[in-house]
C-alpha cells in the first residue's frame, strides 16, 4: 500500500517547476534515522521513483542522532542547489521545536517545503509474551505491574515516543521509555523480547504482525484501516480522543532557487 501511494505521488510531484540543476550529479536523500525503520523504508521505496523523475541518481544517506536533528542540520547547511533533500517527519520539523530549546536549525527559516509525501498511522503492538489481546487488557496489566513494561521509540520527542506518553497519560499507567537512534533498532529489540510495547508505523508493524512476531492491539488513527478491518482503533477500545499519526515530507535548504 505504501509503495503504491508513494509511486502515485512521485508521478505528480515533479510536474511543477522545482529546483534541480540540469546535471547528472547524484541527489542525496537524507534520512535522519537508522536503516531499517519505517522512514528509511519509505525513503528507499521513493528513491528509484525520484531518480526516474529527475533523471539523476538518488542516494539514500542515513545521518542518525538527536531525534533527527543531526540529519536536518546537515541538509540546512548544505548548498542550496537542489542536490540535497531532507526526508523530514512531523517529529523533526514540528515536535522538536517544542522539545529542543537549542535546536541547531530553524524549520521555517532554514528550509523550503517541497511536498508532503504521506501520512502514516501507527499501530500499538506488544511482544507475544505480554498477556494482553486488546487495549484494556494491556492497561490492566500495566496497572497491576507498574514500571514493568518497557517501550521503545526512534528517539526522545519522536511521534512514537509522544504517542506512547499520550497513551500512558490517558490510561494512567507507567511505562519506561527506551529511546533509540531510529525505529529499526527499537523494533529489533521488541522482536527479541527486550521491549514489551511499541507504537510502530503501519508499514513496519504489519509484516511482523502477520508473521506472529508481535501482537497488534489497535490502530492510532481515528477510523479503522480498510486493509485491516478486523483491527480496532485504540480510541474505540475505551480511549476516546486518542488519535496520533505522522507525516513524511521533502524539504530543501532555504534559498534553493525555483529553477537552476
Image (spheres, helix red, strand yellow):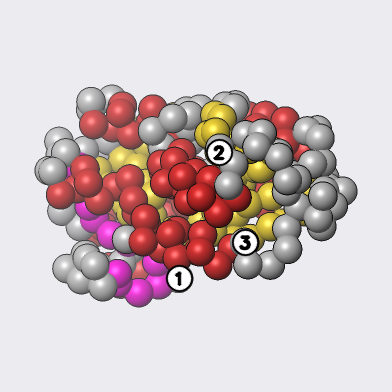
Of the pair 142 and 216, the residue shown nearer to us:
216
| Circle on res. 16 | none
Instruction: Point out the stretch of residues depicted in magenta.
Output: 214-225
Spot occupied by residue 130 in the image (x, y as percentages of width and height): 18, 40
Residue 121 on image: x %, y %? 41, 59
Q: Is 223 colored magenta in this rendering?
A: yes
122 horizontally vs 99: left or right: left
Q: Is residue 253 magenta?
A: no
Q: Which residue is mark 1?
A: 241
- Front position among marks 1 and 2: 2
Label 2 vs 3, first from the N-terminus: 3
| Point 51% across, 50% down: residue | 52
Q: Quadrant of residue 64?
A: top right
Would residue 251 be found to the left or right of residue 228 on screen? Answer: right
SS assignment at label 3 = loop
Name the image quarter holding residue 120. bottom left
From mark 2 to mark 3, how far is it between C-alphas?
15 Å
Instruction: State the mark number for residue 58.
Output: 2
Q: Which residue is mark 3?
A: 14
**Which residue is at a point 51% across and 64% down the rendered structure image?**
11
Amino acid at each position: 500500500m505504501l509503495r503504491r501511494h508513494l509511486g502515485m505521488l512521485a508521478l505528480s510531484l515533479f510536474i511543477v517547476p522545482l529546483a534541480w540543476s540540469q546535471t547528472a550529479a547524484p541527489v542525496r536523500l537524507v534520512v535522519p534515522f537508522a536503516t531499517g525503520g519505517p522512514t528509511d523504508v519509505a525513503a528507499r521505496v521513493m528513491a528509484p521513483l525520484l531518480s526516474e523523475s529527475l533523471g539523476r541518481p538518488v542516494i539514500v544517506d542515513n545521518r542518525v542522532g538527536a531525534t533527527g536533528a543531526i540529519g536536518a542540520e546537515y541538509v540546512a547547511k548544505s548548498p542550496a542547489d537542489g542536490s540535497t533533500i531532507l526526508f523530514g517527519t512531523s517529529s523533526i520539523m514540528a515536535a522538536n521545536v517544542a522539545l529542543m530549546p537549542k535546536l541547531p536549525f530553524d524549520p521555517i527559516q532554514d528550509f523550503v517545503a517541497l511536498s508532503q509525501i504521506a501520512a502514516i498511522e501507527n499501530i500499538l503492538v506488544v511482544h507475544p509474551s505480554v498477556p494482553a489481546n486488546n487495549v484494556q487488557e494491556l492497561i490492566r496489566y500495566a496497572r497491576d505491574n507498574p514500571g514493568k513494561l518497557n517501550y521503545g521509540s526512534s528517539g526522545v520527542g519522536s511521534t512514537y515516543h509522544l504517542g506512547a506518553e499520550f497513551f500512558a497519560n490517558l490510561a494512567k499507567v507507567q511505562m519506561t521509555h527506551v529511546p533509540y537512534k531510529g525505529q529499526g533498532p527499537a523494533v529489533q529489540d521488541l522482536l527479541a523480547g527486550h521491549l514489551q510495547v511499541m507504537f510502530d508505523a503501519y508499514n513496519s508493524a504489519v509484516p511482523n504482525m502477520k508473521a506472529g512476531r508481535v501482537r497488534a492491539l489497535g490502530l492510532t488513527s481515528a477510523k479503522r484501516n480498510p486493509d485491516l478491518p478486523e483491527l480496532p482503533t485504540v480510541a474505540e477500545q475505551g480511549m476516546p480522543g486518542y488519535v496520533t499519526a505522522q507525516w513524511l515530507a521533502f524539504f530543501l535548504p532555504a534559498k534553493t532557487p525555483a529553477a537552476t
